[in-house]
Structures are given as structure tokens and as C-alpha cells.
């Protein structure tokens, strides 16, 4: 009883400290990451090791870096969000010098109070143990002389390198050095090394060393990870659904706030402010807000038009919540009413999207929504006289209709048949740039409607359905007042 009471008091203080720290608590659990490593292990061949590296830090300019974003596979398997780290997952138990067995090793950034003053707290090895549940965690420097005999494995699984990582002079074990060390430990760069190293000028010596290469496999790991990540667990669905609902609210509030005097950047700001209000840390991809002809650029990110006027505004934005990103597009008339031509194009895309969503059924091929959406759009463009031949429809609908979403906006997957708990977009579009080979009245119209669909045994569930997509529902919502109507700022000279 006493120990139970002590436990309850301790828990109370732990909870209090946690709550007082004011940070969210609804992250993926250690158990989730552990299970994912276990699931990967089951896919790996016997006597193999999978090696994952953290994402590089990207420099923006001079001494300013972009906000760091962990590699999604690394995050999925560890929950660790710092750079300069390596994860090893072994298919079979290994034994260390002291006779202790282990089947995974996490090499993390070493704690460094001076650097932490500038860039924030590092978990270090102790944190990796206590906060992430990694029993075997070491500093990155230990990987530089890991002593792991990579030659003894039948498969050393990793994703090949892009040669785009900077060498950070002030870090002892930065990603650059970790990768260089790994390459040397597996004999990846042996030819280069022997050529540059005078000790290896002897031809015979060169020969024996060149033949010493680990059994590297740079193709299988990606597909193992894709097959894991394409099916979302319950925990993932909670976070992903939250990101999607936040993004839908962003669309709703922007529909209410929209008027022709707004700039593309201001519209972007309304969405992103709402994301932050709900605790979303980032955007899952650079926000796309294209007024009129700008909407014809599929990934338009300048958002630099100062006034959207009476045009359509294509808004493709997604909140990222604890790593999981939505991908939701709405296209609305800035003045609240679709013109005749805008409505004809809009309703055609809507019809194609609705039919596409209905195809998201277990067992259907991943391409099924695209096939039906493309057929409807092609026939519609022909009927409207925008094209004369069905095969020209691709000019105005030049992209695919669906992709998985998750930790990546374009999430990996096998892209075969639909299975329960996949989440994918259905996003047909029609884009008619100024100067197109059709009547001028269509020029500058760009429409994409994009929703995030969960595959279930009971059929598709539209997770972004809160944001209206029917043209008359959009017009009705746009008539509502917005709290932003009263938001006025002083004029700056
Ligand atoms: N937002 C990028 C896409 O729709 O695929
Ligand atoms: Mn998309
Ligand atoms: Mn999108």
C-alpha cells in the first residue's frame, strides 16, 4: 500500500512537471516506434543489418540553417528528432564483448552545453534511454570506430547516399563524418581510398583490399519501409486526422475571410495562423496559394500576387502535426460567387473527384480513382469544346490523382491495391493557362479539389470533409462573417 501511495505521489509530480513544461504530450509512443522496429526486423532477411542515417542539416545562408526536419523513416523507427545520428537494426541478436545481447543500436548527438545554449537541449545517450526507451544508445563518435564487423552480414541494408551533405567543421561526429566512416567500414569507397592512400600503392595489397566489401544492398530497405508506412496504425491515424482537420478548419476560416483585396501571402498567413493556433508545428510542404493564372503552376509557392481580385484562388495547404501532414486543396472565387465559366470547370472537377473518392475501396487498384476522374474530365473538356480529342485532356489535367500521405506529403507505399487504414489523396484538377489553345473565356482558370481519404472496410471516409467542396456550399459559407473582418492594422508609410 505504502509503495503504491509513493508511486501515486511520484506520478503526480512527474505529471505536474510535465504539464508545467507546457509542451504537448500526444506524440507517438515509444511502444509504437519499438513495434515498428520489430515489424521491420520481421521483413529483413536472416543475418542482416539495416542502417539508417538522420537527415542532414540544410544551410539557408551564411550561418543560418533551415529549421531541422528529421528523416521520416528515422523518425518512424525511433521518435528521435535530432540530426547527426545513426540507427542500426539487426535481424538477429548480436553479442557484445561483455556477452550482452542486443538487436539495435542508436547513435545520437553527444550532449554539449555550449552548443545546446544556441541550438537547444540534446537528448544525449541518457535521454535516448529514458525518453525513447533505447537500451543501447551511444554517442555518434562511437560509430566512427564502431568495431561492428559489417563484412559478417549477408545483407547490409541502407538507402544509397546523395553526396549532398556538408562537413561541419565544429562537430566531431556530424552526419558527413558518420557517413564517411560507414562507407569506410563497409568498403564502399575502397577504390577511392586505395587510389588516394600511398600505403596501398602496392598492387597486390590493393587487390586483396578491393575484394573486401560488405554485402551491401541499397534497394530492399526502401520497399520494406514503404510496405510498413503505407498502412497507418491507430496512433498514426489520430495524429494524421488531427493534421487534416486543422487544415480543413484553415480552409473554412479562409473562405469566410476571403475578399478580392487580399494578397496571396495574406491568405497563406490566415491558413498558417490557424495551424499554429491548433498546435501544428509546421506546414507539411510549402503552401500553395495561386490567384487566377498562378493556380496553373502546380506547385506555385511564390504567393506574391498583391491582390487576388475577382479570380479563383487555388489553396493547397497542409498542416503538419507531430510529423504527420495533411494535403488539402480548395479552390474558391475571391469575390464569393463563381462566374459561369469558373463554375462549369469547378463542377466538372468536383464530379470527377466525387467519382474518384467512391473508387477508394479495399481491393481496388491504386489507379482506380485516377482512371474514373480522368475519364470524366476528358469527356467534360470535350463537351465544353476546350479540347477536340480525348487524348488532349492531359494538357489540362497533367498530374496524377492520388498519393499516400503520412510523415511525408508524398508518402511511400507499394501503390498496388487499397488496403484498410491507408490514407491517400484524391485530387483531380483542370488548369487552363493564359494563351491555351481554346476560347479565351477559359484562360486563367485553375481548379484543384483535394481531399484526404481513409480506406476502411465500410468504404472511403473523407477526413477533410469538414471543408465544403460543392460550389453552392462554398458560396454559402463565403457569405458568413469572419472574425478577421474586424482585424485592421495601421498603414505603414
Ligand atoms: N500539395 C502537393 C500535392 O498535392 O501533391
Ligand atoms: Mn496531393
Ligand atoms: Mn496538395
Image (spheres, rainbow, N blue to C red):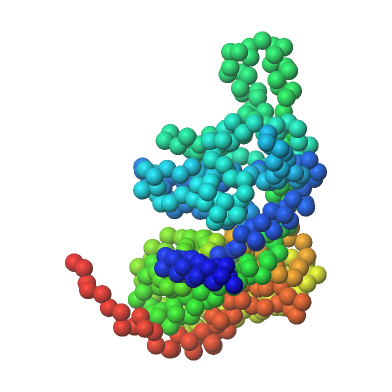
Residue at left offset 78%, top offset 52%: 42
Residue ranking furthest to the top: 202
Residue at left offset 54%, top offset 80%: 467
Residue at left offset 22%, top offset 73%: 490
Residue 311 relative to residue 422: left or right: left
What percent of the width, then of the height, locates residue 478? 45, 85
Residue 404 or residue 86, whichever sits in front:
86
Image vertical order of residue 209 relative to residue 54, above or below: above
Residue 245 relative to residue 91: left or right: left
Residue 308 or residue 264, whichever sits in front:
264
Total numbered labels placed on residues in the image: 0
Residue 127 or residue 397, whichever sits in front:
127
Q: Locate the N terminus and report the quarter of the image it occupies.
A: bottom right
Visible residue check, residue 385: no
What percent of the width, then of the height, locates residue 483? 36, 83
Image vertical order of residue 320 relative to residue 157, above or below: below
Q: Quadrant of residue 202?
A: top right
What percent of the width, then of the height, locates residue 254? 44, 77
Q: Quadrant of residue 463?
A: bottom right
Visible residue check, residue 357: yes
Residue 323 or residue 40, whichever sits in front:
40
Residue ranking furthest to the front: 2
Residue at left offset 69%, top offset 11%: 203
Image vertical order of residue 410 relative to residue 442, above or below: above
Residue ranking furthest to the left: 493
Residue 399 relative to residue 283: left or right: right
Q: Locate the C terminus and report the quarter of the image it occupies.
A: bottom left
Image vertical order of residue 129 relative to residue 400, above or below: above
What percent of the width, then of the height, locates residue 67? 44, 53
Amino acid at each position: 500500500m505504502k509503495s503504491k501511495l509513493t508511486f501515486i505521489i511520484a506520478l503526480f509530480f512527474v505529471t505536474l512537471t510535465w504539464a508545467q513544461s507546457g509542451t504537448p504530450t500526444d506524440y507517438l509512443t515509444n511502444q509504437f516506434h519499438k513495434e515498428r522496429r520489430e515489424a521491420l526486423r520481421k521483413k529483413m532477411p536472416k543475418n542482416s543489418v539495416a542502417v539508417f542515417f538522420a537527415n542532414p542539416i540544410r544551410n539557408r545562408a551564411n550561418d543560418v540553417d533551415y529549421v531541422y526536419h528529421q528523416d521520416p523513416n528515422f523518425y518512424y523507427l525511433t521518435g528521435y528528432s535530432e540530426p547527426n545520428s545513426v540507427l542500426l537494426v539487426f535481424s538477429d541478436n548480436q553479442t557484445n564483448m561483455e556477452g550482452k545481447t542486443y538487436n539495435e543500436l542508436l547513435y545520437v548527438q553527444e550532449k554539449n552545453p555550449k552548443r545546446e545554449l544556441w541550438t537547444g537541449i540534446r537528448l544525449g545517450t541518457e535521454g535516448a534511454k529514458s525518453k525513447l526507451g533505447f537500451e543501447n544508445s551511444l554517442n555518434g563518435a562511437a560509430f566512427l570506430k564502431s568495431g561492428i564487423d559489417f563484412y559478417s552480414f549477408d545483407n547490409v541494408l541502407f538507402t544509397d547516399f546523395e553526396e549532398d551533405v556538408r562537413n561541419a567543421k565544429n562537430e566531431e561526429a556530424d552526419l558527413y563524418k558518420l557517413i564517411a566512416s560507414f562507407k569506410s567500414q563497409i568498403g564502399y569507397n575502397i577504390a577511392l581510398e586505395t587510389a588516394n592512400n600511398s600505403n596501398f600503392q602496392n598492387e597486390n595489397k590493393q587487390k586483396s583490399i578491393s575484394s573486401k566489401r560488405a554485402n551491401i544492398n541499397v534497394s530492399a530497405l526502401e520497399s520494406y519501409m514503404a510496405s510498413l508506412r503505407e498502412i497507418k496504425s491507430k496512433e498514426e491515424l489520430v495524429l494524421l486526422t488531427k493534421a487534416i482537420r486543422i487544415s480543413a478548419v484553415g480552409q473554412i476560416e479562409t473562405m469566410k475571410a476571403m475578399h478580392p483585396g487580399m494578397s496571396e501571402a495574406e491568405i497563406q498567413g490566415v491558413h498558417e495562423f490557424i495551424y499554429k493556433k491548433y498546435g501544428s508545428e509546421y506546414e507539411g510542404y510549402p503552401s500553395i496559394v495561386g490567384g487566377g493564372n498562378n493556380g496553373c503552376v502546380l506547385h506555385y509557392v511564390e504567393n506574391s500576387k498583391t491582390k487576388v481580385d475577382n479570380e479563383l484562388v487555388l489553396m493547397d495547404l497542409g498542416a503538419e502535426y507531430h510529423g504527420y501532414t495533411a494535403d488539402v486543396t480548395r479552390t474558391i472565387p475571391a469575390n464569393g460567387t463563381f462566374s459561369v465559366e469558373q463554375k462549369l470547370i469547378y463542377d466538372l472537377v468536383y464530379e470527377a473527384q466525387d467519382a474518384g473518392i467512391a473508387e477508394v475501396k479495399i481491393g481496388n487498384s491504386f489507379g482506380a480513382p485516377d482512371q474514373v476522374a480522368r475519364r470524366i474530365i476528358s469527356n467534360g473538356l470535350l463537351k465544353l469544346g476546350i479540347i477536340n480529342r480525348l487524348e488532349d485532356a492531359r494538357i489540362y489535367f497533367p498530374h496524377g490523382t492520388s498519393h499516400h500521405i503520412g510523415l511525408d506529403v508524398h508518402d511511400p507505399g507499394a501503390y498496388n491495391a487499397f488496403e484498410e487504414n491507408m490514407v491517400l489523396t484524391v485530387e483531380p484538377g483542370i488548369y487552363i493557362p493564359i494563351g491555351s489553345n481554346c476560347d479565351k473565356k477559359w484562360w486563367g482558370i485553375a481548379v484543384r479539389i483535394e481531399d484526404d481519404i481513409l480506406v476502411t472496410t465500410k468504404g472511403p471516409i473523407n477526413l477533410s470533409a469538414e471543408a465544403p467542396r460543392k460550389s453552392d456550399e462554398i458560396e454559402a459559407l463565403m457569405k458568413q462573417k469572419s472574425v478577421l473582418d474586424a482585424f485592421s492594422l495601421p498603414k505603414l508609410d
